[in-house]
Image (cartoon, helix red, strand yellow):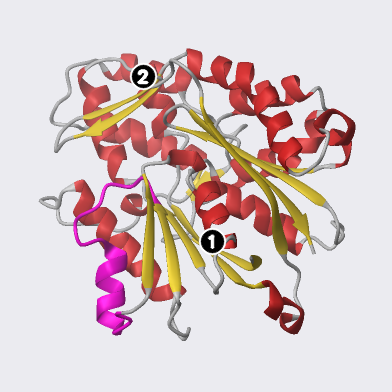
Amino acid sequence: MNIINNISMFFPVAPISQEKLIFLLKNKVITSKYLNRTKEDIEAEIDKYSVNSSKINQRALTTQIKKFDELMAVPEICDEIIYGLLERIYQGKKQPNHIEYVTSTEHSIPTSLQRFLAYKGWNNTYINNFFDRGCAGALPAIHNALNLPYATDIFCAEIFSPYVDLIAQNLAQKPNPQLVIEGTLFSDASVLCSTIPQKNFKKAKSNGLELLAYNEIIIPDTHKGIHFRSSTDKLNLSVLPYVPAKIKEYVLDFTKELCKKANLDFEKEKNSFVYAVHPGGPKILTNIQEEFNLPLSYFQNSIDLLYNYGNFSSPTCPVLLKNILENPAIKKGQKILAIAAGPGITINGLVLNKI
């Protein structure tokens, strides 16, 4: 078994205020060559449906700062950004034995990670891909990494910013409240979780997270709930209205079963857990809080992360765990409950112990 002993977060660019990003989105739509609506109609729609600065303070969107060749397709832009992140993350580091690679970002083949390892001459580093798992992607990767007998890295990267131009093109032609929400919710980010074998952990003299249990389900009859497909000029992204309600319907029983696998009774123990729940959006987090019948303060870690950076999909739960790992007020022996949902609709969860 392995122990998580370090988690680091990396942004490709410095975050920008949400107010400025909403202004820039409006400008992209209004100046689009596809414009088929009035300026007043567009501004009213974005003002009504955007995730405003009371919910999110800032986000990192690379393409708002760095310019790319306009002929580059979305996967090429994402490849370049992720390759740059890998160069920063592994600068001065030794070759890793194994990397769990988590992303839902569109990519070319070979991937940025494969090209980076080849460039470094790290030709015998194992790669295990967790693609297209959305916001929940890091949790099965962590579960897998912690069950391996040798040190393993978990690299999560999500690049949303190239889709903002596609969202603008879509909104220039016709109203789409869901795209306004998506265009003002997501952020670019990456995270690296490092693990070491349990037998080496004491020598590391650091805090750690050990695995107690893992659970995963696909909610019945929800496979059409989250849909994503892009082309050179269109973005078809839909999250159907029933998604938050379905997660709410199943999350309590899912969590009880997860805790049972760790020989814990959720109803008896729920007040003593520290929570790392992927915020998704404000509605999903509130629904989970209501089902658990806990004060919203139990989820302050998630609320603060969403406010400070937006939703960066798969790196989010690891960053929540980073905050727990580094918080001296959270003592060793504390049980942690990490939960996230993704396409499928899948719910994934971990019970961890801080050591």
Please provide percent x and percent y for residue 127.
37, 65
Residue drawn at x 25%, y 80% as measured from the top left: 119
**Left or right of 257 in this view: 150:** left
Residue 224 disc label: 2
Query: Which secondary structure, mark 1?
Result: helix
Please provide the residue range marked out in magenta: 103-123
Q: Residues within 10 Å of mark 2 (few under 14, many from 20)?
A: few
Residue at mark 1: 145
Query: Is 118 rendered above or below residue 111?
Result: below
Residue drawn at x 14%, y 50% as measured from the top left: 70
Comes first in the chain, label 2 or label 1? 1
User: Image quadrant for the N terminus?
Assistant: bottom right
**Residue 132 visible in image:** yes
Examine the structure image and report whether residue 276 is included in the region drawn in magenta.
no
Residue 335 disc label: none
**Residue 286 visible in image:** no
Query: Which secondary structure, mark 2?
Result: loop
The mark lying in front, picked from 2 and 1, is: 1
Please provide percent x and percent y for residue 329.
87, 58
**Left or right of 16 in this view: 31:** left
Query: Is 323 rendered above or below residue 187?
Result: below
The residues tagged by marks 2 and 1 sit, at their Cα atoms, a distance apart of 30 Å
